[in-house]
Image: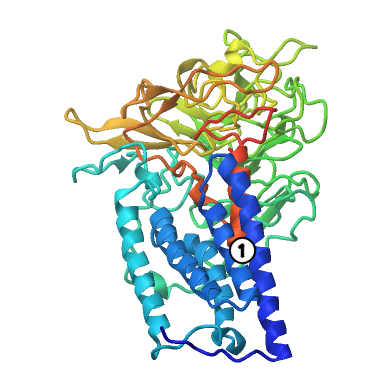
């Protein structure tokens, strides 16, 4: 056996070595303590084992024992193999597992610590360490490929297969040939333009042609700036601002043609997201072409598209109040968050109810007004489906009903308007909801534009307790079918589920399954739906089911803390109900 004499370190070297040893012990004990808690909660034993090893390494280094370095090196090799097994080669998931341990290991390169290591051959120790790292890479990769470590692809976790190439769906036949006359370009919200001057080959050469100053940014509310998609009719652009101002701009130059302050140029704190256009059949002169907008008073306002002057024959001096009968007792509880939809000579508006305020919030009634006179044409109140007129004096539409705050779609040919709905407030508690609230929450309702009567409805959630409204305009398309194009609708949801329906009947074109979901552990007085609708034939955009391995931190210590918190939360995948016994991950 060869004996190697290691010189005694200087006072500075001894202090350096023991300071590093103390740091190793501190890190090791942190990992050990948290590792015990995590293991007790059923989590990964890695942190417990690593804490023991790093603590032991620190003790050996304190004593000047060269085995402390080799023990730490063995931990690095094991950490590399474990990390790749657990998360593969995802860079951001490897950062908290590898960066800090390897950076801390650089301390062993200090001269006073290198003298602890026997030098019996040139780079013999580094060769063994490098070989161990290569072995760890290979072992981790093999285990990751064959084990449960890889997260599911969130786009395909429902099991949907990639469809074979075939005929493509087409936008509605009524897509405009030029301009952008509706909020989504057409009533079906396809946002599709047939214009072909901009291509993949020249899009990078676009330059700013002009800019227009629409006014100051409000200092109220939580938004700020524009939240609007302008429409383009003829050679003019029309938009609205958070100051309740409607503006017309020359589409070629950006020059302002007119502006109309709907509420005295006062900021509301609520975004105005768009205006609508209508050509009065057979009319000429003022207000033959009209722009409709909802102020945040809220009023429905009709303006002459050419001058911005109010259409005095519409309502009272160009406006009709949207507060009538909704039961809005407090300012701001009821407002309009989407542009009106114009179909069959009717201007249809929903309304947004401020979330989670109170039981007895304003009604979520959907109303249509005559596009010329501004008179109420019909009202769709889910609590009184047999009454399409305004409520009698002294009464209101049914309070606290599901509201339709997102943009609506319409099919002029079918005479249907498609209204996406949210929850009956308060949105995250359903103990007080009535049967008709549950029947219409988080749904799409097809309403006859002439009569206000329901044709069909499709519900994307049963007794929604997560505020998973239908937040997007339903997209109307024509799907290829053996007997000719089929009138279809795509419904996107906050849940990440995508439903494809027949827009004539409301029947599902792509299969819909009612699947059991998590039960129990909710708040007092609440109830849970035993199943929820899923769309297995379409990609799910909700993301993969979360795992302990997905938890993140800058270092292993705070990642471990995050993993402990995850283990102690209630989480059973998508649609885990919120309870009061412990935090819930949604």
Q: Looking at the picture, how far across and down is residue 482, in whole percent? A: 16, 30
Residue at 54% across / 21% down in the picture?
519
Q: Quadrant of the C terminus?
A: top right
79 with respect to 308 (left or right): left
Q: Looking at the picture, how far across and down is residue 306, in whole percent? A: 60, 50
Give the answer, above or below, for where 557 lies relative to 405.
below
Can residue 561 be seen here? no
Q: Which of 1 and 69 is in front in this view?
A: 1
Give the answer, above or below, for where 506 lies relative to 245.
above
Q: In which quarter of the image is residue 411?
A: top left
Give the answer, above or below, for where 94 lies relative to 336.
below
> In the displayed image of the protein, which residue is found farthest to the left?
482
Residue at 65% across / 43% down in the picture?
303
Q: Which of 576 and 160 is in front in this view?
A: 576
> In the displayed image of the protein, which residue is found farthest to the front?
1
Q: Quadrant of residue 121?
A: bottom left
Q: Quadrant of the N terminus?
A: bottom left
Count of marks overlaid on the render: 1
Give the answer, above or below, for where 197 lies relative to 458.
below
Residue at 63% across / 29% down in the picture?
578
Q: Looking at the picture, how far across and down is residue 527, in whole percent? A: 61, 16
Q: Name the residue under label 1.
A: 55
The secondary element bearing badge 1 is classed as: helix
> In the displayed image of the protein, which residue is found farthest to the top?
386
Q: Nearer the viewer, residue 67 or 298?
A: 67
Question: Alpha-carbon neighbours of circle 1 within 10 Å: few (<14), some, or many (≥20)?
Answer: many
176 with respect to 573 (left or right): left
Q: Looking at the picture, how far across and down is residue 557, in whole percent? A: 62, 59
231 with respect to 522 (left or right): left
Residue at 70% across / 28% down in the picture?
580
Can residue 512 be seen here? yes
């Amino acid at each position: 056996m060869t004996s190697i004499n290691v010189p005694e370190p200087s006072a500075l070297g001894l202090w350096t070595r023991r300071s590093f040893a103390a740091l190793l012990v501190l890190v090791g004990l942190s990992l050990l303590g948290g590792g015990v808690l995590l293991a007790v909660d059923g989590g990964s034993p890695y942190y417990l084992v690593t804490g023991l090893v790093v603590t032991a390494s620190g003790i050996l280094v304190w004593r000047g024992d060269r085995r402390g370095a080799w023990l730490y090196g063995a931990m690095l090799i094991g950490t590399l193999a474990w990390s790749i097994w657990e998360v593969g080669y995802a860079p951001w998931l490897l950062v908290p597992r590898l960066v800090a341990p390897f950076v801390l290991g650089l301390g062993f390169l200090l001269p006073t610590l290198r003298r602890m290591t026997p030098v019996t051959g040139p780079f013999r120790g580094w060769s063994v360490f490098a070989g161990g790292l290569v072995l760890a890479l290979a072992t981790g990769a093999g285990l990751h490929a064959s084990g449960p470590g890889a997260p599911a692809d969130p786009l395909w976790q429902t099991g949907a297969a990639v469809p074979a190439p075939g005929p493509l769906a087409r936008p509605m036949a009524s897509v405009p040939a030029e301009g952008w006359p509706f909020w989504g370009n057409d009533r079906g919200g396809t946002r599709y333009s047939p214009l072909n001057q901009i291509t993949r080959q020249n899009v990078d050469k676009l330059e700013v042609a002009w800019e227009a100053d629409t006014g100051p940014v409000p200092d109220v509310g939580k938004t700020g700036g524009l939240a609007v998609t302008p429409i383009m009719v003829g050679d003019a652009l029309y938009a609205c601002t958070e100051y309740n101002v409607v503006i017309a701009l020359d589409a070629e130059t950006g020059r302002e043609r007119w502006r109309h302050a709907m509420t005295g140029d006062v900021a509301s704190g609520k975004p105005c997201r768009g205006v609508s256009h209508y050509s009065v059949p057979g009319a000429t002169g003022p207000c033959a072409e009209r722009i409709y907008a909802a102020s945040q008073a809220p009023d429905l306002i009709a303006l002459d598209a050419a001058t911005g002057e109010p259409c005095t024959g519409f309502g009272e001096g160009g406006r009709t109040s949207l507060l009538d009968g909704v039961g809005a007792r407090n300012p701001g509880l009821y407002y309009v968050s989407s542009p009106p939809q114009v179909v069959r000579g009717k201007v249809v508006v929903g309304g947004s109810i401020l979330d989670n305020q109170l039981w007895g919030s304003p009604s979520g009634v959907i109303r249509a007004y005559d596009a010329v006179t501004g008179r109420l044409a019909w009202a769709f109140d889910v609590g009184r489906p047999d009454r399409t007129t305004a409520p009698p004096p002294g009464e209101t539409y049914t309070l606290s009903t599901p509201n339709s705050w997102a943009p609506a779609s319409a099919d002029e040919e079918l005479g249907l308007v498609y209204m996406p709905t949210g929850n009956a407030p308060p949105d995250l508690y359903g103990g007080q909801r009535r049967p008709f609230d549950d029947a219409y929450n988080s749904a799409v309702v097809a309403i006859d534009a002439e009569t206000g009567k329901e044709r069909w409805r499709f519900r994307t959630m049963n007794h929604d307790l997560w505020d998973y409204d239908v937040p997007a305009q339903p997209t109307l398309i024509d799907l290829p079918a053996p007997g000719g194009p089929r009138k279809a609708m795509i419904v996107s949801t906050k849940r990440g589920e995508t439903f494809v329906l027949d827009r004539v009947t409301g029947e599902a074109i792509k299969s819909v399954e009612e699947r059991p979901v998590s039960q129990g552990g909710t708040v007092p007085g609440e109830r849970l739906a035993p199943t929820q609708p899923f769309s297995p034939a379409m990609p799910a955009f909700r993301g993969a089911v979360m795992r302990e391995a997905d938890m993140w931190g800058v270092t292993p210590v705070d990642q471990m803390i995050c993993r402990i918190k995850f283990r102690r939360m209630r989480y059973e995948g998508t649609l885990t109900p919120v309870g009061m016994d412990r935090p819930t991950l949604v």
